[in-house]
Image (cartoon, rainbow, N blue to C red):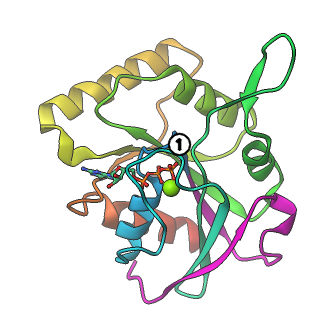
Amino acid sequence: MKIKSATFVVSNSEVSKCPNTRIPEYAFIGRSNVGKSSLINMLTNRKSLAKTSGRPGKTQLINHFLINENWHLVDLPGYGYARVSKKDKKYFQKFITDYFEQREQMISAFVLVDCRHEPQKIDMEFMEYMGEKEIPFSIIFTKADKLRPQALERNIEEYKRIMLEGVWWEFPNYFVSSSSDGTGQDEILNYIEEINSN
Ligand code: GTP
Ligand code: MG
């Protein structure tokens, strides 16, 4: 898919206020600082369409971008746990789970994980949450420029091993990306184009 236009639409703190259209959308989610906003800029060939920062917690709202006048790309804040009860039970921030559970226009999500790290508990739990709710997603291993191909391969294999030993029957669809050198751009955009045309 060629990007002909990419424009910022609106930022929201609540799902109910997100654009009231039937335009299909694709959401990017993952821990703070994993590279969600940078990936959105890379995919759209824009330097600063989405705001990025070296400090975690830059994106705080649900951000809609309109691409090629026919689909929405959504930049979300990093997930973490919100403490909600005396027993110290923790959940993902409510507006993030509300977004995924209520947003009917959301066709498929991309869960970003940093390719340099071994599987982290919070990412595993978030993907299990997505699985339980039957929300379609792919994994994106970000910052691939930071690892040699062999180390990258090893880390992906470790994800496969841990997920397949856990609750997963099959390893989710996945991509590898680098916002520094453009790795993954064609694959991710073509994947979105393919789903969008069905
Ligand atoms: P929050 O909005 O805080 O949740 O973070 P985010 O996931 O949107 O991350 P962001 O895109 O702001 O990037 C975080 C940091 O990682 C920035 O310093 C980026 O320059 C850096 N970064 C993001 N993607 C890549 C990548 O592919 N390669 C390298 N080397 N650095 C990256
Ligand atoms: Mg961000």
Q: Residue at x 27, y 54 (%)?
A: 178
Percent from the top left, x then y, of residue 30? Answer: 53, 42
Q: Is residue 30 above or below residue 128?
A: below
Q: Is residue 70 left or right of residue 91?
A: left
Judging from the image, what secondary structure is the residue with disc 1 in?
Answer: strand
Q: Which residue is mark 1?
A: 30
Q: Residue at x 41, y 82 (%)?
A: 3
- Number of marks in the rendered image: 1
Q: Quadrant of the N terminus?
A: bottom left
Residue 13 in the magenta stretch? The answer is yes
Q: Residue at x 40, y 75 (%)?
A: 44
Percent from the top left, x then y, of residue 198? Answer: 60, 70
Q: Is residue 45 left or right of residue 72?
A: left
**Picture quadrant of residue 157:** top left
Q: Nearer the viewer, residue 56 or 167?
A: 56
Residue 169 visible: no
Percent from the top left, x then y, of residue 25? Answer: 64, 67
Percent from the top left, x then y, of residue 93? Answer: 73, 39
Q: Is label 1's Cβ within 8 Å of ligand 1? A: yes
Q: Say which amino acid is labelled 1.
A: Gly
- Pointer 1: residues within 10 angstroms few (<14), some, or many (20+)? many
Q: Is residue 133 left or right of residue 35?
A: right
**Picture quadrant of residue 191:** bottom left
Residue 20 in the magenta stretch? The answer is yes
Q: Residue at x 14, y 38 (%)?
A: 149
Q: Nearer the viewer, residue 94 or 70?
A: 94
Residue 60 visible: yes
Q: Is residue 4 above or below residue 37?
A: below
Magenta-colored span: 1-28
